[in-house]
Amino acid sequence: MALLGLAAIALVWTQLGDGEPIRNEAVQELIPGPGDEVLSQTAVGIDLVDDEPYFVGLTVNGVQIPADEVLFAESLNRATFNPGEGQVIENLQAEENCVLAEFYPTIDGPGATQSEFWCFNAS
């Protein structure tokens, strides 16, 4: 019985790591990670599994990022937005920032949209 309890604790600790667990199996990494502390011009985005191409839309602090400002590395299935001069967001806000990533496999279309929401802090 004690071994079963230790196994359950180890599983929870592995899933939680330093931040929140990623809830969607299509997601490999959230950029920056949930709860991370970053600088105000850090890239924001999502890294998806490499099994098929995805369409990705990003919303940062309630501001939808225009498609032409989202950088998509097809070979990595990674979509990022870099705040900066001339961008829709020039700097991440001090303290908490939240991201909504909406994505779907391009072969399935918008009817298969999934999402991931997370927050981190910037200084």
Image: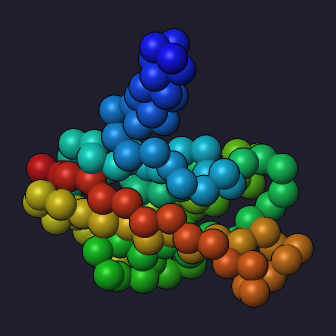
State the residue in front, 25 or 8: 8
Query: In the rendering, at what x and y percent does residue 36 appear?
Result: 28, 43
State the residue in front, 104 or 87: 104
Residue 9 lies, with reference to residue 46, above or below; the image says above
Residue 3 lies, with reference to residue 25, above or below; the image says above
Residue 80 lies, with reference to residue 4, above or below; the image says below
Whether residue 69 can be seen here: no
Q: Is 112 left, or right, of 101 in this rendering?
A: right
Residue at the far top in the pictured view: 3
Q: Is 114 left, or right, of 43 in this rendering?
A: right
Query: In the rendering, at what x and y percent does residue 9 appear?
Result: 42, 25
Query: In the rendering, at what x and y percent does residue 49 appear?
Result: 72, 48
Q: Is 84 left, or right, of 121 in this rendering?
A: right
Q: Residue at x 54, y 45 (%)?
A: 29
Query: In the rendering, at what x and y percent does residue 14 appear?
Result: 48, 28
Q: Residue at x 24, y 63 (%)?
A: 97
Q: Residue at x 26, y 68 (%)?
A: 90
Residue 44: quarter of image: bottom left
